[in-house]
Image (cartoon, grey):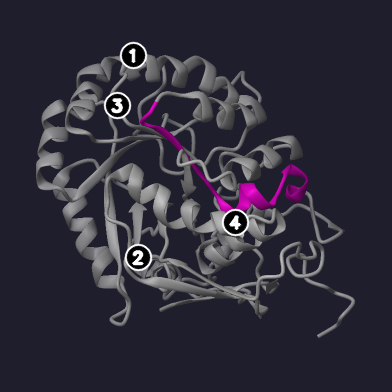
């Protein structure tokens, strides 16, 4: 290995806190895409090797919009979990204009579905069946039923107004949509997912009880410059492209402060979103970063740089469980300061290209093992 090509993770940010090993409660990923079929078989083990539970996103084609579809999807997820892994998928429903209060009550009574996901139509991958922010008021009876049964609403928080700059869409949504929604339904539990802006962080911090936010690996590590260069080498970086898009450094710093603060309002949600390499490196490349293969280790790296490793367990393992009213995991994960190299790609049966993870081929500073 050429020592001149030092890893971004290991050498560019020398550690501030001399911790060689630590144990934390096994984590939960409160925002995860596992897809379906061969892709799910390829990517799910990257999560289940360490994470005991995950909130599974419903944006398949067709979307997972009914209890029956969620139950069938859960069966497929469980069939893809390696035999020697323990894992519980926490299922969600996709909010559509056809979602009724009875759908919500039925899902809550069954117990398999833990939340409902709102994708503003056109905001991200497979969001076409979603509800536009201008239409959400028509679903007030459904949202009221969610509040009554304690079913959280998970929000992809971006405006779909084409006149709004792509870097401003989250801040616009906070002002014009989220603020009103939180006030209109004071008992509805709401998660602002994959927060990317200081405006989003500040809103969640000051919001009423029952409002929380998830934070991803890539938005904690990278600012928007990383779309155009990496490790000092220029060039468009499709594997850094996700939605919401990476933002300015001032926003990244606000996210890091929130994640490492110890506040129970923020918890880990990787938004790990796998796409085949040829769909990412494309004239119209897909949005999403595949972070599952080193998610916990990369979170640990961020917390280490802030001197806040003592806050890592709350962010990855307890805040999310507490918000969802779940028992905390009983197993532990051991993290060791030991560099290892992330594979360049993960093969997918039947596809010509595999899935390239975030930090592909780079040295990862921490290594984690489920105990």
The reply to whether residue 241 is in sight is no
Using residue 56 as the reference point, say whether residue 120 is left or right of it: right
Dot 4 falls on a residue whose secondary structure is helix
- Answer whether labels 1 and 4 touch (C-beta < 8 Å): no
The image quarter containing residue 10 is: bottom right
Residue that label 4 marks: 280
CA neighbours of label 3 inside 10 A, class few (<14), some (14 to 19), many (20+): many
The verdict on residue 355 being magenta is: no
In this rendered view, identify the residue nearer to me: 257 or 162. 257
**Measured from the top left, where is residue 229 in percent x and y?**
80, 53
In this rendered view, identify the residue nearer to me: 32 or 199. 199
On screen, residue 246 above or below 184? below
> Considering the image in quadrants, where does the C terminus appear?
bottom left
Q: Give the residue drawn at x 82%, y 61%.
A: 231
The reply to whether residue 47 is in sight is yes
Q: Give the residue drawn at x 75%, y 50%.
A: 226
Earlier in the chain: of badge 3 and badge 2, it is 2
Comparing labels 3 and 4, the label whose residue is closer to the camera: 3
């Amino acid at each position: 290995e050429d020592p001149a090509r030092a890893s971004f993770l290991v050498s560019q940010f020398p550690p501030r806190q001399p911790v060689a090993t630590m144990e934390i409660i096994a984590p939960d990923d409160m925002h995860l895409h596992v897809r379906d079929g061969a892709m799910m078989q390829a990517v799910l083990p990257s999560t289940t090797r360490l994470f005991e539970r995950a909130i599974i996103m419903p944006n398949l084609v067709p979307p997972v919009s009914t209890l029956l579809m969620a139950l069938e999807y859960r069966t497929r997820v469980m069939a893809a979990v390696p035999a020697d892994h323990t894992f519980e998928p926490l299922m969600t429903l996709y909010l559509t204009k056809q979602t009724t209060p009875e759908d919500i009550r039925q899902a809550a009574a069954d117990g398999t579905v833990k939340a409902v996901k709102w994708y503003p139509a056109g905001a991200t991958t497979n969001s076409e069946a979603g509800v536009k922010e201008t239409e959400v008021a028509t679903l007030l009876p459904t949202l009221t039923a969610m509040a009554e049964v304690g079913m959280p609403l998970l929000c992809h928080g971006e405006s779909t107004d084409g006149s709004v700059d792509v870097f401003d869409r989250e801040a616009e949504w906070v002002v014009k949509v989220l603020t009103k929604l939180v006030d209109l339904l004071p008992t509805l539990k709401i998660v602002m997912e994959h927060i990317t802006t200081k405006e989003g962080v500040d809103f969640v911090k000051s919001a009423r009880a029952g409002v929380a936010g998830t934070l991803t690996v890539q938005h904690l590590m990278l600012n928007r410059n990383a779309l155009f260069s990496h490790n000092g080498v220029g060039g468009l970086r499709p594997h850094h492209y996700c939605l919401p898009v990476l933002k300015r450094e001032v926003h990244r710093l606000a996210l890091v402060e929130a994640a490492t603060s110890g506040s129970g309002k923020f918890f880990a949600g990787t938004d790990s979103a796998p796409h085949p390499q040829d769909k990412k490196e494309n004239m119209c490349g897909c949005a999403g970063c595949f972070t599952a293969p080193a998610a916990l280790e990369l979170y640990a790296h961020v917390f280490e740089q802030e001197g806040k490793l003592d806050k890592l367990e709350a962010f990855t393992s307890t805040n999310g469980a507490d918000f969802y009213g779940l028992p905390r995991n009983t197993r532990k994960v051991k993290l060791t300061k030991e560099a290892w190299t992330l594979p360049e790609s993960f093969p997918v049966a039947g596809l010509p290209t595999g899935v390239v993870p975030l930090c592909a081929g780079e040295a990862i500073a921490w290594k984690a093992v489920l105990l």
